[in-house]
Amino acid sequence: MKSIILILRYFRGPLTDKNIARFNEQQTPSGDYLADVYVNGTLVTASTNIRFNAVKEGQQTETLPALIGDESGTDKITPRNRRCDPSGRPLREWVPHAGWQFDSATLRLLLTIPMTELTHKPRGYISPSEWDSGALALFLRHNTNWTRTENTDSHYRYQYLWSGLNMGVNLGLWQVRHQSNLRYANSNQSGSAWRYNSVRTWVQRPVASINSILSLGDSYTDSSLFGSLSFNGVKLVTDERMRPQANAVMRRKFGA
């Protein structure tokens, strides 16, 4: 027993005492961590950068990115102060009566928030902040048919080509689209001729705040009740793909 006491005394020092005290207080070393965030036991976001800062001896605070306030799920954090610092802020500055606990073994940040501070979200809700506008792209699709007719008795030869073209470019949230067709006819009697016909050209982009698509240019009216009519102008139409899955099911159920 005496030898053990001597060894402990030999290794004791101010730096060792400080480190042991920190672990005894179950503090997480200051720094950035990629952690899964749970709100009242429900996972709301995975692999989110969380920063821990040592305020003073025996106390510690976490810094949550403002994006967590808009994360999707059954519930979400509703910040009372809408002027949030984009770099992040402690949870109690968003919700005064909330609590948190960090599990360093599983890298889970467990947030406890009163139900009065939570907003219910329908099943399948995805925050617009997580929508991907896609990559910059230029594409061309075609549907081409070619025929050749030849009469050996009259020495008549005829060729015909028709191609439907769909082309466009994606620039962030903006999408430029153009539809057209190309025709080519050639015979040994009447010669050859090309004809290009532009069907429609338009620009569109999503409007996430109202779950709609805004289109500018050539478009058509809805044909669910009456015949479709073409027009050139502005069109704003709801896109069901932007709605949560639960809302879409309810609309089909009640025929909305």
Image (spheres, grey):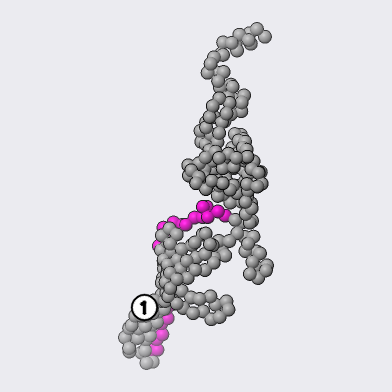
Q: Which residue position is annotated with label 1?
A: 196
Quarter of the view holding residue 170 = bottom left
Q: Amino acid at mark 1?
A: Tyr
**Residue 179 in view (yes/no):** no
| Location of residue 223 in the rendering, given as x and y in whole percent from the top left corner | 54, 77
Picture residue at 41% right of the left edge, 60% below the top: 171
Quarter of the view holding residue 181 = bottom left
- Look at the picture and state if 5 lies above or below 251: above
Quarter of the view holding residue 36 = top right
User: Is residue 145 shown in magenta?
Assistant: yes
- Quarter of the image for the C terminus: give it: bottom right
- Which residue is more in the foreground, 56 or 243? 56
Picture residue at 46% right of the left edge, 68% below the top: 215
Picture residue at 38% right of the left edge, 92% below the top: 153
- Which residue is more in the foreground, 20 or 196? 20
- Look at the picture and state if 142 lies above or below 59: below
- Quarter of the image for the N terminus: give it: top right
- Which residue is more in the foreground, 177 or 65? 65
